[in-house]
Amino acid sequence: MTIRGDSAMGGAGLPASLVTLVDTAITVAARVVAIGSLVALFLALGAEVVVRYLTTQGLGWPSELPNILFPWLVMGGIVLAAQGGAHIAVTLVLDSLGTAAARLLLLGMQIVVAATFFYLAYIGLAVIEITGSEIYPVTGVPASWAYGSLIVGFIGVGLTALTTFARLLMADDPRSVRAHVTEEEI
């Protein structure tokens, strides 16, 4: 699995390998979470439809799964978008800067992103504490399970900002780091 920007890091050796390993782990984890959530939701809601059709009674628990799993699906997608450089961006100022100034701007942006998302993860712990007593009645799953996705996702985006920071330091062209290439998706 290749993360965009690997070739831009040049021959940075061990640091580049470590950054690539962390990015790969984040990407794999986010894909597993997103795909697993989607498959579980599809199967549970499909089972609910079949049981309702055959018996005119519902299973009950599948109606709670979107509340529990959809946040995990969304946060997995957000982390994957951060890894792929697919979030919306306005690059007018960046495109008008030279390489050194662009690198400084992008490094500063990654510091702000990392600080913001790690802080949001920290604040999310208070939300977990508050929602820990709320229990979904049929499944018995605490509501904090769904809110935990926010913390995990925020940490994923924060770590992605840190690996992007490292990539920016090693890259010959800072604009190539996490550059979204639509042609690669086809």
Image: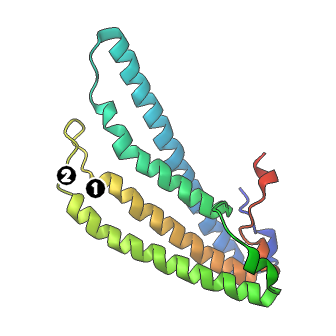
Q: Which residue is mark 1?
A: 144
Q: Are marks 2 and 1 in contact (CB under 8 Å)?
A: yes
Q: Residues within 10 Å of mark 1 (few under 14, many from 20)?
A: many
Q: Residue at x 75, y 84 (%)?
A: 102
Q: Residue at x 60, y 79 (%)?
A: 110
The answer to whether 124 appears left or right of 161 in the picture is left
Question: Label 2 amino acid?
Answer: Glu
Q: Position of residue 119 (x, y in %)?
A: 41, 77
Q: Secondary structure at mark 2?
A: loop
Q: Which residue is mark 2?
A: 134
Q: Quadrant of residue 174?
A: bottom right
On screen, residue 141 above or below 144: above
Question: Label 1 amino acid?
Answer: Ser
Q: Residues within 10 Å of mark 2 (few under 14, many from 20)?
A: few
Q: Position of residue 171 (x, y in %)?
A: 77, 79
| Marked residue nearer the N-terminal end (2 or 1) | 2
Q: Position of residue 90 (x, y in %)?
A: 69, 70
Q: Position of residue 76 (x, y in %)?
A: 51, 54
* Residue lying at the far left of the rendered structure: 133
